Amino acid sequence: MKYPVVSMVCSVLFVAVNADIYLHSPRGSNNRHDENTRERRNGNRLFDSQNNERGGYNVGSPMKYYSGSKYQIEWTNQHSCNNANSNCELILQYMCNSDLRDGTRTNTIPDSEDGSKDQQFGMHEDYEYYLWCSLRERNKGLFTADQNLVNKHTAKYTRQDNQGKRYGYECAEEKDYYPYWQPSPWKDIAILTNNAKKCPYYQSESQNVKSRWGCYFSFENLKKAKNQIDNFPKKSLPNNKEDCEKTEFNGIRGVWKEFPAHGLPQPDCRETDFSRDNHLGNGLDGSPNLYNWTLPNIDETKCVFRIRYNISTEDYDSWNTTAEYNGNPTKLDLSDKYGLPSAEVAKNRGFVFKGNPNVKLFADANFELQLAVDTSQYGRTFQDRTHVFSIKERPDSLKGAVIHNLNVRGKRGNIVQVYPAVEYDFVPNTLNIMTGDYVHFQWTGSNNNPLNNAGQGKAGTDRNNALLLTSQLYPEGNDVPFGPGPVFGHYGNNYPSSLNNASFLDLRKTDLIQLSFLKPNNADKDLNNADPYFNLEPRQVTTVGTYHYVCTRNNNFSNRDQKGRISVTKFTMENGALGYMGGVMTSRDGQVVLIADQGVLDGLQKLTLEVWPREEGVRRMESNGAKLSIGEKYVSNFVVISPQTEITVLGKKFQVRMQTDPDASNVNIYVSSTDSSFSSWSKVKSDIGKDGVATFSASRGGVYVAKSDSYTVLIISLCVSILVIFLIAGGGILYFRKNPNKWKQLKESTNLVKRSTQDKV
Ligand SMILES: *[C@@H]1O[C@H](CO)[C@@H](O)[C@H](O)[C@H]1NC(C)=O
Ligand SMILES: *[C@@H]1O[C@H](CO)[C@@H](O)[C@H](O)[C@H]1NC(C)=O
Ligand SMILES: *[C@@H]1O[C@H](CO)[C@@H](O)[C@H](O)[C@H]1NC(C)=O
Ligand SMILES: *[C@@H]1O[C@H](CO)[C@@H](O)[C@H](O)[C@H]1NC(C)=O
Ligand SMILES: *[C@@H]1O[C@H](CO)[C@@H](O)[C@H](O)[C@H]1NC(C)=O
C-alpha cells in the first residue's frame, strides 16, 4: 500500500503550478502597449494572461492580412502538453468588431459607459458584454474546491479568481471555461488537446455551430442593475430560464433568448504537440510548436487573435467534478486512487484536495511533507492575445490565389533581455510553396523597446529587411543539398547578394530595393529613418528553387541570426497534422485525396502529401537507376505520402483516391513503400472506376503510382496462342494416330526436304 502513496506524492510534486503562454507569431501583447520598460506596465489592461510581466511585444502598426491567406501561428507554452504531466488544452480564437482598439496608453479602460468610449483605452470585449458578465449569476454547478466564494455571486468570480479582478472587459468565467455556455464574441479556430476523444464534444458544442441561450437584459437595464448589485453584493441577475422568467429585479425583467451560433464551420480539433515542462521553447522536432491557420474569408478592419492554454492536474477527474465536491477540505475522496483504505484514513493522512496539505507518508510514523497545492491553480488558464490587425478582402487580381504570409517575430534585444519573448526570426522560417503561389512579406515592430537592449541601429528600435544571400563560395563538409531545384543564396554566408544580380523569388528590382531599404532613396545603412512597419503586398513566385535570405540589420553573426528559406516546387506538397479525429488532405488540383477516418491514426501524425507530375517521378526513378519492367507504363502521377512508415493503428487503413489515365487498360496501383529509391514495388489492392479514379487503402506512407502492364497482356496473349498451337498440334496428332499412313507420307516428304536442303549446303 505504501508504494502508490509515494508515487502519488511525486506526481503531485511534479505538478509545478506555474505555466505561461506567449504568442510569437502573430505577436502577442501579454497586455503590453508600447512601454519602454522590460516589464509590461499593466497586466489588467485587456485580458487576464496569468503570464510573467516580462512577456509580450509592443504594439506596432496594424498588420493587414488577406482573407483566406495562410498564416503560421507560433507560441511557447511553459508547462507541457501531450505529456502525462498534466492535461492540456490550447484554444485558438479570433474576434472582429469595428470597436476593437489598441488605445494609446497602458491604463485599463474604466468600468463605465463613458469610459468605454474613450479611445485612449484599449478595448477588446465591449462594455455591455462585461456588464452582463459581472452582474450575471455565476455557474454554481462548478467545482470551486476550497476557494472562498462566499457572497461572490456573479460570473466575474471563479475558482481561479475569487477576487473578481477586472481585466479590460474580459469575463472571468468565460476565460476559465471552454466550451462556454453563455454567448461569447470569440470565434473558434482550433482546439488542441491531450485527449482528442473529446474533439467531437468540443466541435459540436462550439459556438461556431451551436447557439447559446441566455437571460437577456437591455444595456439600459444592465446599467440600472449595476447600481443595485454594486450595493448589494448578494444579488445577481439570473442565468437560467426558470429564474429569468420568474424573477423581477427591482422592476427589471430579463428575456430568455436564443443567441444564434456564429454560423461558421466547426473548429479544427486535434492532439497537442509534445512540449516539455519548464521550457519555453521548441517542440520535439526542433522547430516551434505551431498551428497553420487559413484566415477566414471576411473583410474586417479590426480583429484580434487569442490563444488560451488550459492546464489541469490529473489528481482528480477535473472534467467530471462538480459543485457537490466543494468545501474546505473538498469532499473529493482520494483514498481509492491513492491506495488508502478509506476516505477517513485519507483525510487523516492529509490526502485531501485543499490548499497546501501536509501528507503523512507512513501510517505509523509521523513523517509529513507539505505539498504545494493551490486549488485556484490546479486547473489554470493562461492566455495571450495580439494587438489589433485586419483581415481584408482580396482585390480581383488576388482572387483564387494561394497567399502565404511571411512575417517577422521577436523584438530587439539579446535572448536574456527579450525573454520570455524571442529574438528576431522570419516566420515561417522555412516556407514551402508551389509555383504560382504568392508570398506576402510584411512585418511590424516598435520604436520603444528598452533603450539598453542589444541590437543594431538606433537604440530601442525594431527594423527588418530581407535580401538574398550570396551563393555558396566554398564547399562544406557533409553538404546537405536543399531542394528543390537550383539553390539561390547560401545559409552559411552572411553577405547579401548584389541587387544587380539577385534572383530572389522573381521579384522585380523595385521590389528588391524596397525589401532591402524599406523605402525609396533610403540612404541610412541601419534603416533608422524607415518605419518599423513594412508591407510589400503579395508577390507571385514562378521560378522553382530554394532561396536563402537574410536581414542585414539584425544578423550579427556571433550574436543573433536572422535568416530564412523559401522553397518553391512545381508540384503539390500539402502538410497536415492529423490525429485521432482523422481528416482529409487534397492535392492542389483535387486529383489526389487522402482520407483518414476517425480512429485510423493513433496520436498526432505530421503527414505530407506530395504529387509529382509523371515526368518528375520518372526523372527521379531514372536518376535512382530504377526501371520499368517490359511492357509497363505509368498511367498516373506519383503520389508520395510521408512519413514512409506504418502510420495507422494496427489493422486500420486510410484511403487514397487518385486519378489515373481513363483510357489505360490493365491498371494496377503499386507502392514503393520502403524509401524513395524505388527499389522494390508491391501491388496494392485497388478499385478503378470507369472515370479512371483509383481507390485504395493503405496503412503506410510510400510512393504510390499506377502502372498499366501491357507485358502481362502480352504474356496472356502468348499463352493463348501457345494453347492454340498446342490444340492444333494435338488435333494433328490425333489425326495422324487415326491415319498412320498419312504420318508416314509426311515423314518421308520432310526427310526429302531435309536432304535436299543439306545437298544445297
Ligand atoms: C480547462 O479545463 C477544465 C477542466 O480541468 C475545464 O473545466 C475548463 O472548461 C477548461 N477551460 C478552458 C478554457 O479550456
Ligand atoms: C466523465 O464520466 C463519465 C462517466 O464515468 C465518462 O464516461 C466520461 O468519459 C468522463 N468524462 C471525462 C471528460 O473524463
Ligand atoms: C554585433 O554584435 C557585437 C557584440 O555584441 C557588437 O559589439 C557590434 O557592435 C554589433 N554590430 C553592429 C553593427 O552593431
Ligand atoms: C552575377 O551573375 C553572374 C551569373 O549569373 C555571375 O557570373 C556574376 O559573378 C554575378 N555577379 C555578381 C556581382 O554577383
Ligand atoms: C505548417 O505548414 C508548414 C508549411 O508552410 C509545414 O512545413 C508544416 O509542417 C505545417 N505544420 C503543421 C503542423 O501542419
Image: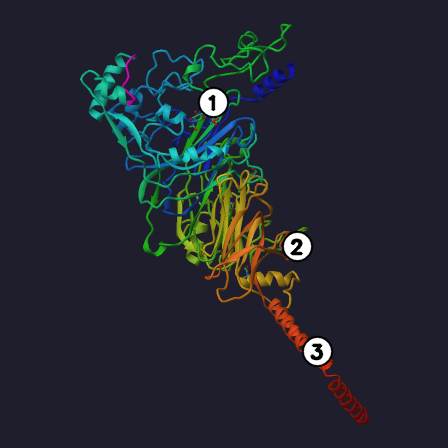
Q: Quadrant of ligand 4?
A: bottom right
Left or right of 385? Residue 225 is left
Q: Nearer the viewer, residue 419 or 86?
A: 86
Left or right of 575? Residue 209 is left
Quadrant including the N terminus: top right
Residue 576 visible in rendering: yes
Q: Nearer the viewer, residue 501 or 759?
A: 759
Q: Nearer the viewer, residue 484 or 59?
A: 484
Residue 434 position within the rendered picture, expressed as x and y whole percent measured from the top left: 48, 55
| Identity, as a three-letter code, of the amino acid under mark 3 | Leu
Mark 2 and mark 1 in contact (Cβ < 8 Å)?
A: no
Q: Nearer the viewer, residue 690 or 542?
A: 690
Label 1 CB sits under 8 Å from any ligand 1 atom: yes
Q: Which mark is residue 318?
A: 1
Residue extent of the magenta highlight = 234-240
The secondary structure type at the circle numbered 2 is loop
The quarter of the picture where residue 236 lies is top left
Residue on which the image places disc 3: 734
The count of marks equals 3
Which numbered disc, 3 or 1, marks the residue closer to the eye?
3
| Identity, as a three-letter code, of the amino acid under mark 2 | Pro
Q: Which mark is residue 310?
A: none
* First in residue order: circle 1 vs circle 2: 1
The quarter of the picture where residue 728 lies is bottom right
Residue on which the image places disc 2: 475
* First in residue order: circle 3 vs circle 1: 1
Estimate the spatial distance between the alpha carbons at disc 1 and disc 2, rounded to whole Å. 58 Å
Asked if 434 appears above or below 292 in the picture, the reply is below
Asked if 373 appears above or below 63 in the picture, the reply is above
Estimate the spatial distance between the alpha carbons at disc 3 and disc 1, rounded to whole Å. 89 Å
